[in-house]
Amino acid sequence: MKVVNENVVIDGIDKTILNFLMEDAKKSILEIARNIGITGAAVHQRLRKLEKAGLIEGSKLMINPRLLGYKTMAFVGVYLDKAVSNPQAVKKLSEIPEVIECHYTTGNWSIFIKILCRDNEHLMNVLNKNIQAIEGISRTETFISLNQQIKRQIKI
C-alpha cells in the first residue's frame, strides 16, 4: 500500500485481504493468511496500515431492520427556505432516529435523506410531526422504496 496524490494505492495482496473481509468481516486473520499464503502477522500489519491510511473506516455489525419491524424505507428530498438553514436543519434531522442518512446535494433539494419506518403510517407521522416541523424546511418530496435491488460496496 502507498499513497499517491492523496489516494491510497493497494496491491493484489491488500485487495485479496479486503475482499475476504468485505465478504465476511468475521473471517479470522489466520484463515485469511492461510488462504493467501502469508503469515497472520503480515495480514495484521497490512490491515493496520490500511486503517491508518483511512481506507478502512472500521467495522460494524449490520442489523436487518425488517426483523425489528421497520418495513418502510423512504427517500425524502428536503427543500429549505434558505441555504443558511442547512446546519440547523441537519442538526434537527440528526435527532430523528428514523433518519439513517443525510446528504447535502445539488439539484432541486438542498438535503436528501433516507429514513426507515415501521409502516406508511409511521412514515407519515415522522414526515408531518418531525421533519416538516423543523424550522427552515419549506417542504419535502417523498419516495417510498418498494424493494432494494442492489446493495454493495465499491469494487476493489
Image (cartoon, rainbow, N blue to C red):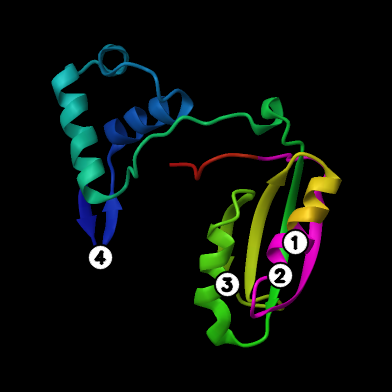
Whole-percent x, y for residue 108 in the image: 72, 78
Question: What residue sits 55% from the left and 77% below the top?
Answer: 86
Residue 138 appears left or right of 39: right
Circle on res. 5: 4
Disc nearest the viewer among 2 and 3: 2
Circle on res. 133: 2
Q: Secondary structure at mark 1?
A: helix
The residues bearing labels 3 and 1 have C-alpha atoms spaced at a distance of 14 Å
The residues bearing labels 2 and 1 have C-alpha atoms spaced at a distance of 6 Å
Q: Secondary structure at mark 2?
A: loop
Quadrant of image for the N terminus? top left
Q: Earlier in the sequence, mark 4 or mark 1?
A: 4
Q: Disc 1 residue type?
A: Lys
Please provide the residue range marked out in magenta.
127-150
Q: Are marks 2 and 1 in contact (CB under 8 Å)?
A: yes
The residues bearing labels 2 and 3 have C-alpha atoms spaced at a distance of 10 Å
Q: Are marks 3 and 1 in contact (CB under 8 Å)?
A: no
Q: Are marks 3 and 4 in contact (CB under 8 Å)?
A: no
Whole-percent x, y for residue 127 in the image: 76, 60
Give the residue pinned by disc 3: 89
Give the residue pinned by disc 1: 129
Q: Earlier in the sequence, mark 4 or mark 2?
A: 4
Q: Disc 3 residue type?
A: Ala
Q: Earlier in the sequence, mark 2 or mark 3?
A: 3
Seen from the viewer's position, the closer of residues 51 and 109 is 109
